[in-house]
Every structure is written in structure tokens, then in C-alpha cells.
Image (spheres, coloured by chain):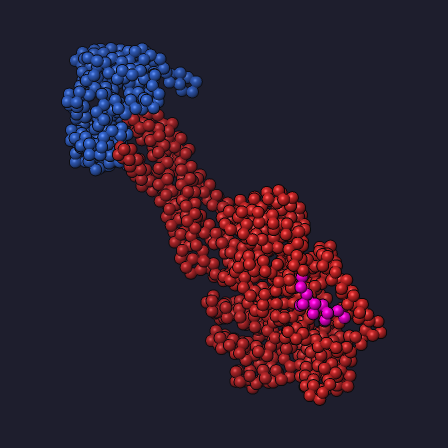
Chain colours: A red, B blue
Amino acid sequence: MSGWFATLGVVAQMAFRNLFASRLKTIIVGGIIFFGGLLVVVGNSLLDSVVASMSRSVIGSVAGHIQVYNAKSKDSLEVMGRMMMGDPDLAQLDDFSKVRASLLKVPNVKSVVPMGISGALVTSGNTIDLALEKLRNAVKAERDAKTDADRARAQAQVAAEKGHVRQIVSVLQGDLKNAKAVLDAKAIDPADAEAVTRAASDKFWQDFDKDPFNGLEFLENRIASQAADADLLFLNYVGTDFQAFQKSFDRMKIVDGTMVPAGKRGFLFAKQVYEDQLKLKAARRLDKIKEGIDSQGETIATDPDLKRMVRENTSQVREILLQLDAPKTTDFRAKLQRELSSTETDVGKLLATFFQTDDQNFHQRYDFFYKELAPSLELYRVRIGDVLTIKAFTRSGYVQSVNVPVYGTFQFQGLEKSTLAGALNLMDMVSFRELYGFMSGEKLAEIQALQKEAGAHDISRENAEAELFGKADAPADAPAVKAPRHIQATTTPGVSAVTHDLGESLGGKLQREEARSRVFPPGEVEQGVVLNAAVIVKDPKKIKETIAAIEAQGKQDGLSLKAIDWQEAAGLIGKFVNVVRIVLYVSILIIFLIALVIINNALVMATLERVKEIGTLRAIGAQRRFILAMLVIESIVVGVIFGGLGALLGALIVTVVGKIGIPAKSDIWFFFFSGPRLHPFIGTSNVIAAFVIVLLVSAFSSFYPAWIAMRVTPRQAMSEEE
Amino acid sequence: MKAIVSVRDAVKNYTLGNVVVPALRGVTLDVVAGDFISIAGPSGSGKTTLLNLIGCVDTPTSGVVEVAGKDTRQLSERALTELRLHTIGFIFQSFNLVSVLTVFQNIELPLLLQRQLSGPERKTRVLGLLEKVGIRDYTNHRPSELSGGQRQRVAIARALVTRPQLVLADEPTANLDSVTGQNILDIMKELNRTEKTTFIFSTHDQHVMANANSIVRLADGKLVDRVTPGVAASQPHGAQV
């Protein structure tokens, strides 16, 4: 029907001509629509990109596509973003094997991973505690040496450790001097000052050789408390079945150490937590400065964050000084003097000068640090192979502590930079249950066994000291591990980690050995209590349907299961995305409401101006629908052209920005971008959505004027008023 | 000859608020095909109302108006529009061209609404009419670029392009000077002769009504008489302003 097309053609032509005839109106209306289309495309694309990178982080790390927990829980499950809120109050799922069996009946479910999520505040070891422990071991070795060769080796060891402790004391002396310079005399405890002076005196060390244990006691009680350098550490951990976890979250990769073997207790640090919180701060800052320069293109000269880190490195050399014993001090002095061509003898000042880096010398200093200095330093406060004592408040409120060996660190491939994916550490399910306060049959048996063991060593009060210091029947170092240290962990901040509790000396060794060697019975993880379960699905597009199917299946199997998608499971973070989306949609809505009003107004005015023309058209035989078509097409043409241009420009912006990437300028952005840069992408659905919205708005805004126009009668063509 | 328009006791009242204003008080009129009629009368005599009823733009309050054999009171709004499109052409006092369209497009418009002719057919028809009304040179001009007389020629061409049986012209010369007005009348007369198109036009100008075959005189919504031009000029109560 060429006539029909021709009519449409003439309608369109009239529409176009009218738009040109009233240019100002067209530009105002078009401008608003242009901006609206731009906003829809850019806003949605950015948000979608954030959600996509976030979903990769959340789904790929611990949450999985769907999280399942007990529907009777008081709070809703939050896998992430609960750091400051404490644990949500969740009812337990009594028998994981039943839950798994039920979930696997749902066709889209690929695998199920048992979980429990909690956290504990941990204090890691102080340098001085470690030094004193080494000194004590050396003294014991000297005393117990059977051959001359052993004795000579032990004596050398004692001398070296003594040197280190004296070095620490001299650092404290320096601190004291500084404190005296800035503080009122009353602010310094005279007893502390006196203790430091005494520990620094040659007389003290001569006495030490005569009665080393007395000297050690003094150092532990009076000096160690003044040399605390360890921060409190909050560790979030997921109790899980390591093997099931690794299988389901296949991006997981062991970075250092090894995987926790099946049926063993163990702890894996998230690589990011390990780097961020356990690494020597000066080294960590060097890493961060390097990353800022290399991958973010920043410079120390211009970026305030990098500047701050350089400043902190120059002023906070104490943590390194504390680690240096006499030979290391000499070594560092020589190396630094050579590197800096300086004659300065104070290692602290040399280090400060060394860390005063700028854009020219940074890379050289960085390499020097890792090649020359780092090998002599403990770079991490907890080493792979150490046993971590984690104390946590159980649900019922008492403190439970569990020893878990650290097997290694892990990260998720492709999500190495994601703060979100790297925030949670992994722990075996059995340790988790104990920390959470579930009393399993196995746990009861363990307690009985411990009591039995303790009974065998029944120690009277008088003999306790001898037991504490005198017994030397076992070397402190387990053979398989390089010098495992015992890390005190507690959920109570402020309690000094220095005091060795009695339990450590009595049962600690036993626990430590046991923590490493004990194997759970095969059904232990499977049939026990879990808090939640991560579900990996086969088809991620059907998450909604699968959630419904899981809950229905749970009902059928007599389990009260609640299933939530990854975004809900992400807690605050997931909600934040929703809030941003709502803000975006509301602003889009407002813009389009305003557009609607303005367009409507403009079109009503235009229609009233054209009453005579419309009447004429009606008189010469145009049906009402022709008039309607003409006006609606007019609006739609504006919508399509300007909205299309807006969407196009938006797509262009997003594409260009997507190529370059938006750099995460601060940690918060790093967090939301799940990495150092966000590469926004254009979703076809966003462009289509923008187009549809623009069309709807322009069509909708022409309804009222069109209605007015349709009521124009042909008689009005005859009227003589112009 | 067959009557193309048949008006029987047509009454038309308009309601202005609560007041009923009678515009036509029972008019009876027959127009045969090929006629060239003038409706004359002073302002408010009902000329335009009568033309509106005949033009299917309005329907009578009572009485019957038949156009091309169809009782307009029986027709829906949509059917009336169809009837206007296919049977009637309109010429307006102030031309009423679509300002954003060219001369050609203005004239083509009713054909597009009819959707019966192909593009080339439409072109031939439009150009032929442009030739006849003598504005072939202005095919692609906009109405705003034309004089009043030229615009009215465009309007005539538009009214005739569908080859209607009936063309209604409401004071077609009122906005034109007398020479131009006469030119327009001449064109209409010529088309009436060659195309056998029926013309009904309203006017209160003596010279203009003199062109008609017969003059229908109205006063106060009533038909006074129907005379031939020679007679009308000599009548004492001629339809002057």
C-alpha cells in the first residue's frame, strides 16, 4: 500500500517541518530528552559494570550464586560487609548431608559447599616475645647440651639472641629519650624507665649469664610489655570443607604453602589479608607505592597517598629496628652506608634516609630493599606453618579457643585485586564449629582425651615452675615446620599478648602437635552442623527460579531453608548497589517527569497555535487518527533523534572510558570496582532501555496535547481569528 | 437534473453556556449537480451555518440535510469525514493552507488522505491543477512566499484535486482585493464549466454574487428567496452588508 506509506510520509514530513518551525521548543524538549538518554545509558552501564565486577568477586569467592540458610534465623545472612556489625544471628542447619541431598535434587544446582562465617580479633606475636622465646630455648639448649659441640653451638646461639634483645632494649632507650623530650616527666612511668636503664646496663647482662632464667623473667615481665609492636588483627573467616570449596570455587588458587589436606584442621589466609595485615608495614607500603606508580600511573610528587606512605616509611622504622640483632645491625649499617654513600652510623637514621624515596630513586630503593634488606627480616608476622590460636566468643558467650595451623595463602584467579573477594580467610569446618560453640560428639571425646592427657602430667602447684622452665624433653620446633611460633589470639582487645598462659606450657605443645596431626572421621564435616551453604548453579541466568525451587524442595524434605541470591548475601555491599540503582532510577524518573511536563506543555502550546490548521485538516477529510499520528510522530521524532543522540553519546563515552578504565582513586573505589580500575561496558539492554524509555516518555507526553487536538472540530477551520 | 444537495427544514441551534442561539430556523434548499450558487446575506444571517451543514462539518439540530444522497444525521463522525474527503472540496476565506508544506504538498494532501492514487498519478493530477489555476511556477514555494490571490488559487486547487462533486467556498474573496477576487471567481467559473463541479459559495459582495447562476438569500436564519443575479440586483431588499 504505497498510499499508506505516502500518508505516513506526509505525516512525518509535517511533523519534521513543525519541529523546524518551532525550533526553540524542539531544542528545549530535545535537550532534556538528550540528557535523559545519556543518563540512562551512562548511569546504567556504570552501575551494571560495578555490579558485574562485584558479582564476579562475590560469586567467585565465597558466596556462590545462591546462599542457603535456616529460614528460622533471626537475622538475614550476610556473607560480606558484616565486619563491623558482628555476626548475624543465624539458626543452624543441623545436618549438612541432608541439606546437600535436598539441594542437589534441584535440577539447576551444580554443587553445594558447607559454610559458617565468623570472625575473631587476633593479636599476633610481638618481636620481643619471639626474641625472648628464642633466647629461652637457647639457654635451655646450653644447659641441656650433652656434647661440647652442642654446647658451643648453643652458646653462640645465646650470644646472638642476647645481642638481639640488647638491640631491642637500646631501641627502647631511644624511645625513652624521645619521650622525655616531648612529654611531661609525670607521663613516664619511672619504674618503666628504670627497668629499661637496668636492662641496658652491662651489669644486668653479666648477671644474666649467672642466672639466665631470672634475667628472662625480668625481661618478660618488665621489658616485653614496653616493646609491643603488634597490632590487633581482625580476621574474618569462613569455616568450610576445603576440598568441596576448592572444587566449587574453581578460581581458587594456593599462592603460598599448600592446601589443607582432607580431614585436617587448618587455616588458609586470603592472600590479600596476608599482605595487607600481616606483612611488615614498611614493605607493604613499598609494594603499594610501587603499584601506584606502575599500574595507576601516579607519582610520589603529585599523589598525596603515595606521599603519605613515603612519610610513614621514613618515620616508622622502629618495627624494623626491633627485628635487628647485633650482626644484622652491623650488616644493615654497612649496606645502607654504601647504598646511600653516607657516613651516618645510626641505623634508624639511615633507614629513614633510605625510605625518603622520590620518583627518581624509588625503583632502585625498592629492589635494594627486597634484595639486600628483606632476607634478614621477618616480612610477615605469621608465617606459613605457624599455629594460630584463635579465641572467639561463641554464640552462647563463653570464650572458646582453637589451635589451627596455617597451611598457606590463597587467592581467586582473576580477582587478585578485588578487596571484596580477598577479605575472607578459610578455616576447616570442625574448628569453626568449636569456635562457634557447637558441641559435637567428637569435641566431647577430644575434651576427655585432653583431660586424660593432662591427668598423666598431673602437676602440683609447687612443681609448676619447674615444669614451666625446667623441662626440656621436647624441642620446641616441630621437625616438619620451620620454627613455628605460637601466636596468641584473643577477641578481647587491650589484653596484652605478652603473658604466656599456663595452658600453653602444659597442654600447648600437645595441642600444637595434635592440631597438626589429627584427622577427622569421614562423616564429621558432612553430617555436622553448618550455618549456611553456598550453591553453585549450572545456569546463572536462572537464579530466581532456582531460589524458588530450593525453598520448595526444602519444604518437601522437611527442612526450613531460606535461599538468597549472591547480591543479598553480599549484605551491605549488595544493598549499597541497590541503593545506588534506586538513586539513579529516581533521578532518571525525575528527569523524565520534568521532561514529561515540559514536553507536554510545549506540545499543548503548539497544538493550541495550530487549532486552525488541525481544523482545516479535519475539514478536508483527515480522520482523528491522522491528527493523533501526526502529533505522536512529532514527539517520537524528537524522542528518537535526541534520545538516540544522547544514548549514542552515552555509549561512546562508556566505550572510550571502558578502554581507558576509571582508576580507583581511593580504597573505597577500589572496593566497589573490585580492582584498581573499572572498565565499564555497554550493555545492549541499556541502550535499548534508554531508547524505549525515551520513546515511551515522548509518546506519553504527547497524549494530552493529542487529545486536545482530536477534539478540534472542522468548524474551527472556518473561524476568522488568526 | 439530480439534486446533489437537499436541505429540508434544517434547524441549527448552538448552545452558548445556557443560552440556545438559533442559527438556522428551518431552511429548505435543493442544489442540482453542476450548479454555481451563491449564498448571500448579512453577517449572522446563517450563511456559514448553512455551508457547514452542507459541508458535513456540522449536522442539523432538526430537519434533514442530504449530500450526495446521504442523510448526514445518520452518519457517524468518521463517515462524515469520509464523505468530506471524497465528495466535497473546501475553500476558506483565509485560505487555511498548511504553512509548513509546499504548494505542491498542500494540494497533494487530500489525495494522500484518500490513499487511492499512486505517486505518479498524484503528481500528474496536482501539476495539471496547478497549471489550471495558473501557479505552476510556484510548485515548490511555501504559502508564506505567496500573495493572497496565489494562496487562494492553491486552496482552490486543493479543493478540486480529489475531483469532488461539490465545492464549498466560504467568502472566498473576502480577504482579496476586487481584481484578484474576480480572477478567483473566473477560475471557479471556468472549473465549473469544464469539470462540471458544483460550486456553492457564500458572499456579501454584490459583484461577487453576480457571477452565480442563482443567489440564495438568507436573513436571520431563514431563506428569503432564491433568484437569478439580474433579478437580485434590482430587488429592494438585496443582500447588502
At horizontal 53% and vertical 67% (from top left) the residue drawn is A305
At horizontal 40% and vertical 57% (from top left) the residue drawn is A656
User: Can see residue B206?
Assistant: no
Q: Position of residue B142 (x, y in %)?
A: 24, 36
Magenta includes A509?
A: yes
Characterize the magenta stretch by its predominant secondary structure.
helix
> Quadrant location of residue A451?
bottom right
Q: Is residue A396 left or right of residue B209?
A: right
Seen from the viewer's position, the closer of residues A663 and A391 is A391
Q: Position of residue A366 (x, y in %)?
A: 52, 75
Magenta residues, start to end: A506-520
Magenta includes B77?
A: no
Q: Position of residue B72 (x, y in %)?
A: 32, 17
In the rendered image, the vertical position of residue A464 relative to residue B30, given as above or below: below
Q: As drawn, which residue projects farthest toward the bottom?
A: A148
In the rendered image, the vertical position of residue A265 relative to residue A697, given as above or below: below
Seen from the viewer's position, the closer of residues B182 and A278 is A278
User: Can see residue A355?
Assistant: yes
Which quadrant, please, contains the C terminus of chain B?
A: top left
State the count of labels: 0
Seen from the viewer's position, the closer of residues A717 and B218 is A717
Q: Position of residue A718 (x, y in %)?
A: 30, 25
> Quadrant location of residue B60?
top left
At horizontal 20% and vertical 14% (from top left) the residue drawn is B214
